[in-house]
Image (cartoon, coloured by chain):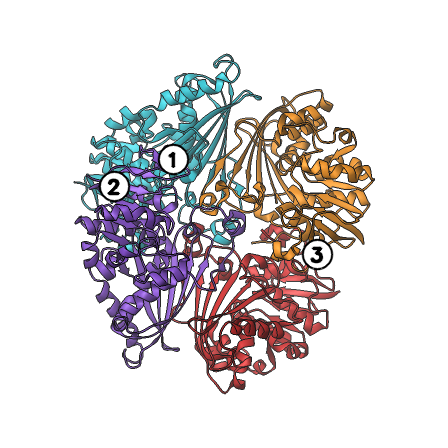
Chain colours: A cyan, B orange, C red, D purple
Amino acid sequence: MVRVGIINVTGYAGAELARLLYLHPEAQVVSVTGRSAAGKSLSQVFPHLWPIDLTVAEELDDVDFAFSALPHAASAEAVAPLVRQGLPVVDISADFRLADAAEYQRWYGGEHPAPDLLAQSVYGLPELHRAAVREARLVANPGCYPTGALLALAPAARAGVIQPDVVIDAKSGVSGAGRSLGLVYHYAEANESASAYALGGHRHLPEILQELARLWAGGSLTPRVTFQPHLVPMTRGILTTCYASLADGALPAGEGAKAAVRELYEDAYRGEPFVRVVPEPPQTKHTWGNNLCLVYPTVDMRAGRLVVVSCIDNLVKGAAGQAIQNMNLMLGFPEAAGLDQPAVYP
Amino acid sequence: MVRVGIINVTGYAGAELARLLYLHPEAQVVSVTGRSAAGKSLSQVFPHLWPIDLTVAEELDDVDFAFSALPHAASAEAVAPLVRQGLPVVDISADFRLADAAEYQRWYGGEHPAPDLLAQSVYGLPELHRAAVREARLVANPGCYPTGALLALAPAARAGVIQPDVVIDAKSGVSGAGRSLGLVYHYAEANESASAYALGGHRHLPEILQELARLWAGGSLTPRVTFQPHLVPMTRGILTTCYASLADGALPAGEGAKAAVRELYEDAYRGEPFVRVVPEPPQTKHTWGNNLCLVYPTVDMRAGRLVVVSCIDNLVKGAAGQAIQNMNLMLGFPEAAGLDQPAVYP
Amino acid sequence: MVRVGIINVTGYAGAELARLLYLHPEAQVVSVTGRSAAGKSLSQVFPHLWPIDLTVAEELDDVDFAFSALPHAASAEAVAPLVRQGLPVVDISADFRLADAAEYQRWYGGEHPAPDLLAQSVYGLPELHRAAVREARLVANPGCYPTGALLALAPAARAGVIQPDVVIDAKSGVSGAGRSLGLVYHYAEANESASAYALGGHRHLPEILQELARLWAGGSLTPRVTFQPHLVPMTRGILTTCYASLADGALPAGEGAKAAVRELYEDAYRGEPFVRVVPEPPQTKHTWGNNLCLVYPTVDMRAGRLVVVSCIDNLVKGAAGQAIQNMNLMLGFPEAAGLDQPAVYP
Amino acid sequence: MVRVGIINVTGYAGAELARLLYLHPEAQVVSVTGRSAAGKSLSQVFPHLWPIDLTVAEELDDVDFAFSALPHAASAEAVAPLVRQGLPVVDISADFRLADAAEYQRWYGGEHPAPDLLAQSVYGLPELHRAAVREARLVANPGCYPTGALLALAPAARAGVIQPDVVIDAKSGVSGAGRSLGLVYHYAEANESASAYALGGHRHLPEILQELARLWAGGSLTPRVTFQPHLVPMTRGILTTCYASLADGALPAGEGAKAAVRELYEDAYRGEPFVRVVPEPPQTKHTWGNNLCLVYPTVDMRAGRLVVVSCIDNLVKGAAGQAIQNMNLMLGFPEAAGLDQPAVYP
């Protein structure tokens, strides 16, 4: 068994790593850290993790593989020495997602704590960068919103059937905001309410732009993207609806366009263990607790727009599950090891 | 007191009419109908309406004013004879919203039951057609989605600051689907889940198109609109996010654009009793149970897009409250009579 | 108009007072206080209260009547000088509910800040103490749980049909815990979860004991009461289920017992503006936003137990609505002034 | 691999069996039936089950083991011939839970379809009847409510520390009502609402009585039990709070009583794979999706009552998970095979 450590197990992504790895046939969590909870047993912090008999420590023990679920900046600082020692790491924070340190500084404030490592980090969306993840020692796990948006848009962007002019309207459950307290996440205020937030620009936008640009014309083009996140009253799940004008002549006229788009997506995702092109518009609940991304592409024939809906569980495919998928690739395990399970429904 | 009747009180819009009219200083519900519940007391069907001592009847009694909350087609059939007798009516169904009977047939199937009345019906969005509502005998109450979308877009469309190329992404609570049973509305399936629906085109689209076209260039122009509704797990509320490319040169460059848009909206809605241009992005819950529409306009500066968020309670401003607002205008009451109350929060 | 002040408007009870009083025909809120929010407009703190144009102040202005929604101890300190000056006050905190200062100290810690006022304070459950409330200058508004429990049990206790041996199992929505932050009220943790709390004894127990003892044998008897509160994932509402063994021979044998109990309750609450003995088991949602208490009494014939279910909105009949009901009595207004409205449903 | 069939896979218990068995190391679902859905693929009916490539059939194929998730009466009819042929079966319906066919008829109406099999059926609560389950060919899976109630009460009842006079107040999520449609389960009506139901007596009561009687004095005593179920707005989970007067002198006086009760429960459940005596009052969410029952026993010292709280997931330990636990025992697999996983939290 590979000995795995989780840095900052006390947030939702960290706890979800522990939950999912409990079922992993080839990896075992042997060390977990967390500052405020140091010294407590894991099951004191998270009663649902009681079968895992570990104490939250301040420092990571000797491990073969590490996940960091620290906030940005703190994560790079914790992860950099490990990577330099040769430990393979998946970083769930945003620190190694953006190739450009200046862009990082623009969105996250402060200088990048380890800009020298950016060149070797790989953006860990396996469906786009599988080969590179396999070779990587440092994988930057994508944000939850970018995961849903990029899997919805990638086939169309790569095939050039849409114009680089996109609206991404995403609806997230509340666990996406983490375990920190805030009035907006207080049950009585969040329940039975929906709202838009980050109207001035969300930190997940530059990731989306970076990856879409890579898909379109190899980075020579800057797509025009409006990404707007929303909070909806549910615990888990992101529903992403993407809109883009069709490129002229890229699809057959009339109803054939729908079938052509569908075929394009099915071809793009054939063989993917965690992306399904579904026959009916999906609900987020169909991914509750598992690592799937469900994608439903169609065409608004009246307006000449591609419309793609995707669903993920923000804590699994949007965080911990995808991190394990990346670990599996990095360590040569079957890609779905420990992750092959149906969603919990209803 | 004006004697008011509600045709088909047994759905959510009908029940909400009864609830709101209970507080009306100049109108009193004296007759309610409903086929399946005929003979029952209103409080058997809806215990929260127990202070209203009425029996659900098959036929409307003699009244001074009628609301119809019947489904489309059935509503026109019930309403037409009343209108012809000179009774003022607000029809909450879709039957008299579309000026073009052919368009009606395209979206609703079947011939229009009373095409001769279309010319005299007024689309009852008071913020767009107040003067006409005041003179009308037959008002077609707008759909819930069009109410949220049109109030979000009207000032920008009328002022010409956006191109007629719009994406409307709406998120509705489950009561919008009415009181009929369906697996998709079963608590265990709808809760903790979000989904898109009607991807082939929703019946509220032609209303939106009709009204936007009137705003732009007096109807000589067909806006390109993608309207996509979503179901989110809450009982009441519609959050609508609208996206449209800015018209060239219509706004100042740079951050001044945001202030200019904001001023445009504040000017447009100054004095409106039920539209507020809010200083922070609103939550649907801020309108729970009352007739407000909250609007938050801004600009995505990177992408050059207007983004407008609006919130309404789908059963109030999206149905029964707006119907009463229309009644108030038709009968010469103060527009806010019976409707001036804070939302229920939290 | 009576000029009303709300001390500590920034919690849910305070905000609900402001919301409800907006509709009151004879009282107007003219002054609101709150420490952390002092200097802000009320609508910054609570956007749903925007029609009320007031600034949150540190100190109360000159008013004719005051509500205190401060926490215990702080409330008595703020209220005592007002009462001594002759201002009529309803205190929503627990400070003046218990007649015995020693009992107060046992449950709330610390000495009572104004024990001299206990003798003149009246426990403001109008259905039990209407005449005294009418004469009072200081009314202690009951706790939310005691309101639901006492209205469920009072007729049976007073009539002697049950033994003084009672289990009260109450299920509360999350707003009952107030607006303070806590992990247990974080949406992601509270949603889709139910739990019991305060298993060592909840502070509302001594109120319940005090009032039940007054009902039984004029205080000469100490009922044996287990009161167990639970948190369920909803925003508003308390469902209380009470169980008590029947007193020997107090009811007819057989199914007649149910009818006898029902008649007892109907007689007890005949004419009460805010208590309804309902024909079917009620749901909390039937009281959403209004001042009703719905009571459903029955008998478990197999076990020989009275079972009574009651529903209230914890913020209305359980707090702000009942406070206004008390004000109405104290000031000689119609008891239902400003409170006569249907619940918001669904 | 043992070849397993699920009769009536189209309800929630059937679907949950399929989900859980997907992870079972020694059993594989090879045949599923369901009348209305016959001919459809399983993933059409339940998209979350798409990795299971099966078509819903009208009749069961040849299998080594069968689960029936049919409604009562239909289940006995389907199961009886299988049992007579020697097939081991777990019946999730109520048909074989009550040893007394007359009692069955009293509560379920109609004669028992296979009274001859009652003598050989075992009540499948492994914590009470493990040895018998191991030998059984026909196991009656307990109801969801009895599972939560009996695990909460069994140690105390068996040890004689309580009087046979019990109140069981249970709060269930909506999935407990199954997948059938009903207004009371419509999202808009069920959400944000709590209610009591079945006040005339719930069908799970006779099971509870039968098993409690077996625990107390070997059946010679009829405990006096009030069992009251409630519906709370969540999808999964049952929270059960049990109240019983302490037997005289059975526990040490004073605070020692709590420790004694705790020790009693810890001893009773030591080594149980799926019952945990927890140190803090549990939330239902700590069992979301897994087979645990969490039990928290304490004493209300003022009233001299044992209070025990238990949590289960009604679809897992309350139905499908317990059924698999029973299968494991019947087939000699490790008891936790396929079931050893943390809950999904948050």
- Identify the amino acid type marked 2: Val
Name which quarter of the figure residue B93 lies in. Answer: top right
Which residue is labeled 3 in the image? B54
C223 sits to left or right of D266? right
Secondary structure beneath label 3 = loop
Specify few, some or many for label 3: CA neighbours under 10 Å numbering under 14, 14-19, or 20 or more: some
Indicate whether C204 appears above or below B188.
Answer: below
Which residue is labeled 2 in the image? D4
Where the N terminus of chain C falls, by quadrant? bottom right
Judging depth in this view, the residue of B167 and D316 nearest the camera is D316
Q: Chain of mark 2?
A: D
- Identify the amino acid type marked 1: Ala
Which residue is labeled 1 in the image? D38
Image coordinates of residue D37 in percent, x first then y, are 40, 36
What is the CA distance from the residue labelled 2 to the residue labelled 3? 57 Å
Indicate whether D166 appears above or below B321.
Answer: below
Residue B210 showing in the rendered view: yes
What is the CA distance from the residue labelled 1 to the residue labelled 3? 47 Å
